Amino acid sequence: MLDKIQLNPLVFLGVILIILGIILILLPTLSKLGLRLEEVHPLLLLGKRFDGVYIGTSPLLIIILIALYLLILFLRRG
C-alpha cells in the first residue's frame, strides 16, 4: 500500500516544517530542565545575547533547508 503513495515534495517540506515547529514549541520546556542555550553545540544553535535577548540561528537547519530547496528545484526541472 505504501509503494503506491508518492510523496509530493511540498508535502514533505510541510511535514518537515511541522516537526520543526513542534521542536520550537518544546524548546522552553528544555530550558526549564536546566539546558542552557549557551551550552548547545554550535552546529545546532549559533547565537548571541543582546540586552538580555538571545538571538540565534541554526547552521544545520540552514544547510538542511538549502538541500531541500535544491532537491525540489532539481525534481521540478527534470
Image (spheres, rainbow, N blue to C red):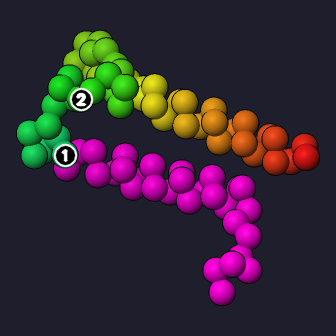
Count the marks. 2
For the record, the magenta segment spans 1-29
Which label's residue is closer to the chain start, 1 or 2? 1
Q: Can residue 19 be seen in this view?
A: yes
- The image position of residue 46, as x and y in percent, is 35, 21
Q: Which residue is drawn at 17% across and 40% down?
A: 31
Q: Can residue 55 be seen in this view?
A: no
In terms of secondary structure, where does tag 2 sit? loop
Q: Residues within 10 Å of mark 1 (few under 14, many from 20)?
A: few
Whole-angstrom CA distance, mark 1 to mark 2, is: 11 Å
- The image position of residue 68, as x and y in percent, is 65, 42
Q: Which residue is drawn at 80% across and 40% down?
A: 73
Which quarter of the picture shows residue 52? top left
State whether residue 40 is above or below residue 71.
above
Residue 14 is tagged as none
Indicate the amino acid at tag 1: Leu
- The image position of residue 7, as x and y in percent, is 70, 66
Q: Main secondary structure of the magenta part?
A: helix
Q: How crowded is mark 2: few (under 14 residues within 10 Å), some or many (20 or more)?
A: few
Q: Is residue 16 magenta?
A: yes
Looking at the rendered image, the disc whose residue lies closer to the viewer, 1 or 2, is 2
Q: Residue at x 59, y 37 (%)?
A: 65
Q: Is residue 39 magenta?
A: no
Which quarter of the picture shows residue 51? top left
Q: Which residue is denoted by mark 1 in the rendering?
A: 30
Q: Which residue is denoted by mark 2 in the rendering?
A: 40
The quarter of the picture where the N terminus appears is bottom right
* Residue lying at the far right of the rendered structure: 78
Horizontally, residue 30 falls left or right of residue 77, namely left
In terms of secondary structure, where does tag 1 sit? helix
Indicate the amino acid at tag 2: Val
Between residue 54 and residue 36, name the one nearer to us. 36
